[in-house]
Image: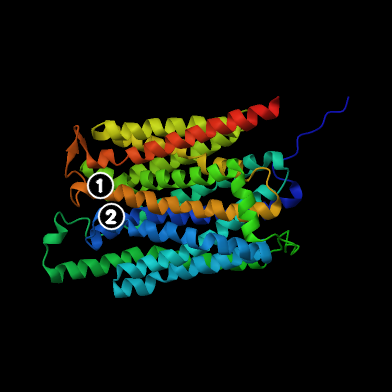
Amino acid sequence: MNKTQAAPVVPKKLLLPFILVTSLFALWGFANAVTDPMVQAFKKVLELSNSQAAWVQMAFYGGYFCMALPAALFVRKFSYKSGVLVGLTLYAGGALLFYPAATTGLFWFFCLGLYILTFGLAFLETTANPYIMAMGDQKSATQRLNLAQAFNPVGLIVGLLVAKFFVLDLLQSDDVENFSALPEAQKLLIKSADLMVIRNPYVILGLVVLAILVLIAVNKMPQAKGDGSIPSIKDTFSELFKNKKYALGVFSLVLYMGAQIGCWTYIYQYAEAKGISSSTAANYQLVAFILFTVGRAIGTYMLKFMSSGKLLFCFSGLGGLFALGAVILEGHAGLYSLVLVSLFLSVMFPTIYGIALEGLKEDQAKIGAAGLVMAIVGGALLPKLQGMIIDFGGVGVNDITVLGLSEMNLSFLLPVSCFTIIAIYGIWIHRKHNIAETL
């Protein structure tokens, strides 16, 4: 009796394109990680409130929302490779804008650089995610995407190490106990020096991205161009949002991004509330990123014998439990609990993404990918809301308490709520789709 061999996760003939596209996952991971600590850095250097400093994330993740659909339309009309090249060009351009931004010292100029940089990331994510899913058998698409996404934490870890050793450790304003009380002339000197420190990693990153752009430009990539026979955007979105699995997937991704960026961004403020410096807090975030990497590997393996919906339910449920620990636990125990959330954040993005796009036609998948990338705007909106909660009693992190819990702790009820809803989506997917397929 002949036994049908399981199709490989990545066919050999597509191995090189898979490796090249997978390298992009590390690139946007680096940008994410190096930017998260900048919220705290700008807060210190430019004397901003938590809510004002959150404009860094508004600019960063708002760029995804604005450019995701145009990126999908571009890729649908031209090619995956063209989308990657445009994305890398915008990425490099936004990073290099940090040079004039540091010279002027204007906060909005830095935000503009981040905004344009994430135009490029929107192109890369809109292109790379569905491209990876298309590189092989559809049955292994979610597993293949998890494999590619496993390289995202590599970029996260490198980005955080750069932020720690080349930004946070070098900020003079963080070494001054009461920076705001210094004479204006002394503050101006420190501020100018610190802005140059913030500038340097982005300028170097821009030059590295330009080098990668050249490398990809000289390599051949499959699926060079679409066939041109494409339905209208209105009809495509109409079909997509009639698909509850997709529509609820977009909503779940909005919540996931809000929870993830909230947990990663405000770990610095959470540590500050415990009397821990930003540089030391970066060590806790490094552990969080290592756990994120480990969790991605564990989750990818578990998909071999567990449905994607059930995996999402388990990981989001445990993530919510540890986020609740950050709310109710005092001292370092709450910080440890917050760090452990990252172990369970690990598989949520690619799993939600894969579930939402599973079974869609290629043209639908390209536009559907844009809707999912637009959902990254959750990383702009919800952290901004969380910053407003932290600022409720004042610009500090421990201004008021409610039922014995500080405003800092209470702000993490927002991620807890997000994880709870995602868990409901996961178990719904498992019961309605995965179980039905086995009957």
The image position of residue 236, as x and y in percent, is 64, 55
Q: Which residue position holds label 1?
A: 390
Q: Which residue position holds label 2?
A: 51
428 shown above or below 399: above
Mark 2 falls on what kind of element? helix
263 shown above or below 187: above
The residue positioned 66% from the left and 53% from the top of the image is: 364
- Quadrant showing the N terminus: top right
The residue lying toward the viewer, choosing from 368 and 214, is 368
How is the model colour-coded? rainbow
| Residue 243 placement: quadrant | top right
CA separation in Å, label 1 and label 2: 8 Å
Amino acid at dot 2: Ser
| Residue 150 in sight in this render | no
Tag 1 near tag 2, CB within 8 Å: yes
The image position of residue 214, as x and y in percent, is 60, 68
The residue positioned 51% from the left and 68% from the top of the image is: 90
* Position of residue 384 in the picture relative to residue 129 (left or right): left
Numbered label tally: 2
| Residue farthest right in this picture | 1
The residue positioned 47% from the left and 47% from the top of the image is: 254
125 shown above or below 321: below
The image position of residue 275, as x and y in percent, is 20, 43
